[in-house]
Image: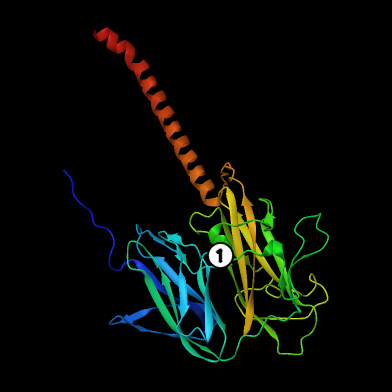
């Protein structure tokens, strides 16, 4: 027999979509998810004050899967601002137990203010064969974003013995050519003339500092975003580490200071690259600053096929107790069987002659 199965159309009820933004409470700093609300197909837009916004995206259900395409974003007034998408810029796939809002697997939008004013930011994420996800929020530009000061420098710190000094990634308002990887080049897989890192080079540290004190207001770092290829099938997982809260750059606002050296008192952005399959992966990093343009750079990570490792079994206290109990039980059963066997053998010997005589 045969039948026809129709797929697609309508809204996927198993997908959650909303804003993922910081929240302050008496308990300290945390994160909240604010779902997008639609009333009679008209958007009820929340108001967001941050220039960079993260989104919450996940599937609900133990057997639910959903692929998503390339996210796009737009602003209602292009004279006031522009917006770019970061994170999973080439799409991805949601599986049970996974979601998009983590450092290594996220979707973000970054707004650049051109004029003072209020406008709406809209993001669209295709989830074929269903209707695309659409979210929107209000944003206000309180000031025009300034250009990056020439004193701001980003340098790659030595990561192998033969490196004697840091490598400038961004300095004097210019991006070094080996780090000039854009989202457009990622989409085209154009990795020519881009610096690459071998499979053994998994931890990279970038120093962010000012070469001279600024007369203007302080440079306030607001966060970093890592963009890679399709997240589910990418051979690498990349995320930001915070080994030292005093010098690390994470999501919280950090003031960038003047230092005489990239290795002393500079703020450090630590990125960990974990290979899960063989291949070459483009990785782009975006650094956001308050009321200032972003610094964006990229590189290529080469991964080898992971080697199989023998699983080691460690003896814990609970495991040892189970083993001892089993040994004691088996020993007791063995002793009991031996005792019964000996007893029956002795009785048989006593009864043997009488039985023969009776026959």
- Asked whether the viewer can see residue 217, the reply is yes
* Front position in the image: 208 or 297: 297
Residue 6 in the image, given as x and y percentages of width and height:
24, 57
> Does residue 338 lie above or below 22 as drawn?
above
Residue linked to disc 1: 184
Residue count near mark 1 (Cα–Cα under 10 Å), binned few <14, some 14–19, many ≥20: few
- Rendered image coloring scheme: rainbow
> Residue 150, image x and y in percent?
75, 79
Which part of the image, by quadrant, shows the C terminus?
top left
Quadrant position of the N terminus in the picture: top left
Give the x, y percent position of residue 280: 60, 52
Residue 168 lies, in percent from the top left, at 76, 67
Residue 58 is drawn in which quadrant? bottom left
Of residue 18 and residue 347, the one placed in the foreground of this image is 18
Frontmost residue, 359 versus 309: 309
Please, which residue is most extreme toward the left here?
1
Residue drawn at x 18%, y 45% as measured from the top left: 2
């Amino acid at each position: 027999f045969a039948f026809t199965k129709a797929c697609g159309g309508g809204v996927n009820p198993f997908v959650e979509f909303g804003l993922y933004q910081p929240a302050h409470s008496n308990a300290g700093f945390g994160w909240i998810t604010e779902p997008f609300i639609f009333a009679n197909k008209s958007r009820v837009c929340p108001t967001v004050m941050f220039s960079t916004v993260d989104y919450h995206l996940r599937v609900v259900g133990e057997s639910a899967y959903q692929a998503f395409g390339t996210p796009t974003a737009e602003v209602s007034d292009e004279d006031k601002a522009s917006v770019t998408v970061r994170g999973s810029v080439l799409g991805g796939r949601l599986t049970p137990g996974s979601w998009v809002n983590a450092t290594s697997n996220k979707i973000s939008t970054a707004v650049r203010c051109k004029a003072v004013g209020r406008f709406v930011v809209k993001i669209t994420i295709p989830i074929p064969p269903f209707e695309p996800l659409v979210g929107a929020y209000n944003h206000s530009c309180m000031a025009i974003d300034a250009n990056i000061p020439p004193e701001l420098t980003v340098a790659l710190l030595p990561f192998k013995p033969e490196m004697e000094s840091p490598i400038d990634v961004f300095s004097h308002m210019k991006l070094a050519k080996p780090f000039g990887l854009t989202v457009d080049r990622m989409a085209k897989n154009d990795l020519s003339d881009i610096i690459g890192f071998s499979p053994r080079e998994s931890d990279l540290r970038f120093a962010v500092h000012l070469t001279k004190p600024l007369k203007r207001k302080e440079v306030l770092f607001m966060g970093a975003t890592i963009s890679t290829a399709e997240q589910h099938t990418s051979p690498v997982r990349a995320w930001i580490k915070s080994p030292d809260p005093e010098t690390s750059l994470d999501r919280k606002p950090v003031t960038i200071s003047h230092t005489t050296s990239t290795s002393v008192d500079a703020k450090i952005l630590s990125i960990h690259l974990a290979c899960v399959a063989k291949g070459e992966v483009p990785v782009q990093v975006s650094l956001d600053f308050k009321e200032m343009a972003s610094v964006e750079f990229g590189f290529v990570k080469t991964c080898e096929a992971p080697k199989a490792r023998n699983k080691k079994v460690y003896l814990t206290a609970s495991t040892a107790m189970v083993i001892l109990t089993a040994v004691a039980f088996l020993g007791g059963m063995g002793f009991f069987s031996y005792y019964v066997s000996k007893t029956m053998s002795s009785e048989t010997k006593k009864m043997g002659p009488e039985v023969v005589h009776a026959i």
